[in-house]
Image (cartoon, rainbow, N blue to C red):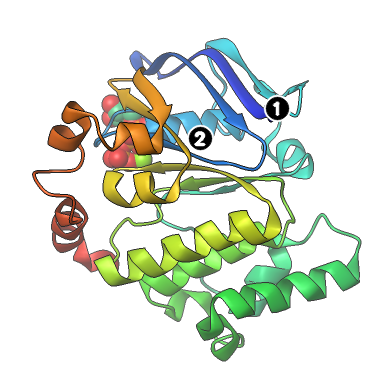
Amino acid sequence: MTAEILQLLNVESAYGPIKAIRGVSLKVRQGEIATVLGSNGAGKTTILKTISGIIDPRKGSVQFKGMDITAKDPAFIVQQGLSHVPEGREVFPLLSVKDNLVMGAYTRQDRDGVARDMETVFGYFPILRERAGQDAGLLSGGQQQMLAISRAIMAAPQLILLDEPSLGLSPKLTKEIFEIVVRINRERGTTILLVEQNANMALNAADYGYVLENGRIVMEDRCDRLREKDDIKEFYLGMKDDGVRGERRWKKKKTWR
Ligand SMILES: Nc1ncnc2c1ncn2[C@@H]1O[C@H](COP(=O)(O)OP(=O)(O)OP(=O)(O)O)[C@@H](O)[C@H]1O
Ligand SMILES: [Mg+2]
């Protein structure tokens, strides 16, 4: 079996008195797409922030490629080959699209590789090439998500953490972005840990999934098996497997676009 690239053991993180994750253990295997599903406030973002060093956990450990990265400096963690695409994108709005991409590669010395990866991301998202000279703040929400993912690729990571790429996007754009996420995994061999409320999209894209409720993992399995479980169908996929939840969220948050 493939070895795990990332492992969390009994991780607890809190914001003052609020315990956001309560003893989370999970593994991400080299080369797979793993997903953590959970509703609003379940602790998904906190898991990713704890992995990438933005939050220091109260307990437990985070191992990346067999190295203990628990509570290490975020810049150090990026240098080890782990990139985080945060919730709500967070591109540099006053820098051009191209300069945002260049910033993503700031730790790299291999100019040829950087130029090649820039071409690759323009291949994935041609609109970014068209807008290369424009300020990133002028892009639509979907385009900013594309840029945020592309900027992560520019660091040439082995593992990408993706926080709710579907947030605020139309079902059509969400589908496009997920297709590219799967291509990044298949074509570049990049391992991906994706957290999502949109269980329908995430379970289709990912190989292995965890279900997070109130800061605890309550279920885990291969995604093809999770999709068949009655409580997943009922609570996370809605009545029908048609992406309705995603659409509802889009309407609620459409100002994001
Ligand atoms: N900066 C903060 N200060 C205090 N409490 C916080 C903070 N950020 C998150 N929390 C709380 O921690 C818990 C987990 O939040 P988290 O953002 O990890 O959830 P989430 O699963 O990412 O939710 P969403 O789907 O809305 O993004 C929630 O109860 C939330 O209210
Ligand atoms: Mg979140």
Q: Answer few, some or many: residues within 10 Å of disc 2's Cα (few below 14, many 20 plus, some between 14 and 19).
A: many
Q: Nearer the viewer, residue 120 or 51?
A: 120
Type of amino acid under label 2: Leu
Asked where in the image residue 132 lies, by quadrant, the reply is bottom right
Residue 70 relative to residue 34: left or right? right
Residue 212 relative to residue 193: left or right? left
Q: Answer few, some or many: residues within 10 Å of disc 1's Cα (few below 14, many 20 plus, some between 14 and 19).
A: few
Instruction: Give the structural element (helix, strand or loop) at label 1.
Output: loop
Q: Quadrant of the N terminus?
A: top right
Instruction: Give the structural element (helix, strand or loop) at label 2.
Output: helix
Type of amino acid under label 1: Ala
Above or below: residue 130 compared with residue 211 = below
Q: Which residue is mark 1?
A: 3
Distance, label 2 to label 1, CA atoms, is: 20 Å
Residue 48: mark in rendering: 2
Q: Nearer the viewer, residue 75 or 233?
A: 233
- Displayed-image quarter of ligand 1: top left
Above or below: residue 201 compared with residue 98 = above
Asked where in the image residue 21 lies, by quadrant, the reply is top left
Above or below: residue 56 compared with residue 128 = above
Above or below: residue 198 compared with residue 216 = below
Where is residue 92? Give x, y as percent. 56, 66
Tell me what residue is drawn at x 69 percent, y 58 percent: 188
